[in-house]
Image (tube, rainbow, N blue to C red):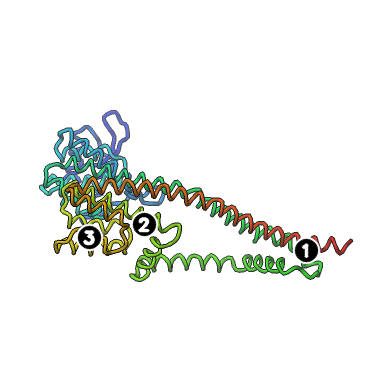
Amino acid sequence: MPVYEYNALDARGRKMQGLIDAGSIVAARQKLRESEIFPVELIETADEKKGAIPVKATWGLPRKIRLRDISSMTRQLATLLGAGLPLVQSLSTLVSQIMHPELKKTLAQIKDDVNEGNSFTQSLSHFSRVFPPFYINMVRAGEASGTLHLVLERLADFTEGQQALQTKIRSAMAYPIFMFFIGSAVLLFLITFVVPNITHMFSEMHQTLPRITVFLITVSRFFQSFWWFICLLIMVMIFAFRYAITKTEKGRYAWDRLKIKAPLFGPISEKIAMARFSRTLGTLLQSGVPLLSALQIVKNVVNNQLIADEIGCAAKAVEEGQSLSSTLAVSGLFPPVTVEMISVGEQSGNMESMLYKIADAYEKESEAGVVLMTSMLEPVMILVMGLMVGFIVISVLLPIFEMNQLVR
């Protein structure tokens, strides 16, 4: 059923806007008038092609549906279902309450699909760009077991936890990144504007300059003359790098290998991947998703192709009757502690709680690792900036000292 966005006036003449679903634009107008709402403008927003999400521009840019939007919506839907409301009524309530325009339209179309007799899982699968396979499979397990509201609560807990972890890591990295850009801007300003004005008088004196000053003047002139080439080169390098790690298999594998093998950054990236693997697998198993299906889903969320391939191999080995811990131990990518704890979980029949303990441990370790790394980066960046500024100052002052000695 189409969804229409309207601008209207209520019985008191106040402006209002919203969404309404109806069979046609005439039926939509009639439905609004029956509610004492008088439409001024009525536009169909539901695309005929399933999965196409209408985008409404805000200041010239589309508003993307983010993880926190999905998390908030899931929490509200779980609360409504837990209170005993039917699914269609719960979705209708969400459509009227959610402020995000794209998510509101998406839920309106999902509500129509469910109202037409489709399952909630089928309706979500039409919007795979919004709801990932992990989300859809958990909803499928919840519908099959009759515990949809409990599964949605677990989903909300999971997404909120992932969002909190990402926020902590980004917050810890914000200051070093800010310092890097500010320091680069200051150095660029010194080289391209301050240094040329100071060194201009040296060329007028026709004096032999120290090599360090000649080098600085050469670098400064190069930046002044070829700044456009440097900017273009940086853009080309960024484009080539992104193309290599997203479009080529060798580049993607090389980047993923570097992420977990590089000093300083590698251990943190590995711990984040292990935490995501454990938390996602534990949540899926607790929600009733079979182990083989859960492994196929998890390998798409670890964000590392090397680890994803090992999980895929583990899934095949489990299908052949081997234990998960033994197959992960062979790979060499999973730490021995992780493999041992999974083995204990398999033997005790309490795999989910053991996976949660692994995830908790790695999340704490990754947060501590990020804090330690940033605390090490800050003095290093200050030292590098100080050395570069010192180099510029010495290069400028050295000829001046030599001239003073000649005058004496």
Asked which secondary structure carries label 2, the reply is helix
Residue furthest to the right = 408
Q: Position of residue 251 (x, y in %)?
A: 37, 69
Callout 2, which amino acid? Glu
Determine whether label 1 and label 3 are within 8 Å by CB. no
Instruction: Tell me the crowding category of disc 1: few under 14, some 14 to 19, or many 20 or more residues within 10 angstroms, Cα based.
Output: some
Amino acid type at circle 3 is: Ser
Picture coordinates of residue 345, whole percent (x, y): 21, 50
Q: Is residue 297 left or right of residue 405?
A: left
Q: Which residue is mark 3?
A: 326
Query: Viewed as shown, does residue 306 lie left or right of 291?
Result: right
The disc placed on residue 333 is none
The Cα atoms of the two marked residues, 2 and 1, are separated by 51 Å
Residue 175 to residue 310: above or below: above
Disc 1 versus disc 3: nearer the observer: 3
- Residue depicted at 56% across the width and 66% down the height: 228
Which circle's residue, 2 or 1, is located before the other in the chain? Answer: 2
User: Picture coordinates of residue 61 (x, y %)?
Assistant: 39, 51
Contact between marks 2 and 3 (CB within 8 A): the answer is: no
Q: What label does residue 270 carry, if any?
A: 2
Q: Is 244 or 258 nearer to us in this picture? A: 258
Q: Nearer the viewer, residue 262 or 101?
A: 262
**Disc 1 or 3, which lies upstream in sequence?**
3
Q: Quadrant of residue 87?
A: top left
Q: Is residue 212 left or right of residue 144?
A: right
Q: Residues within 10 Å of mark 2 (few under 14, many from 20)?
A: many
Mark 3 surroundings: few (<14), some (14-19) or many (≥20) residues within 10 A:
some
Q: CA distance from mark 2 to mark 3?
A: 20 Å
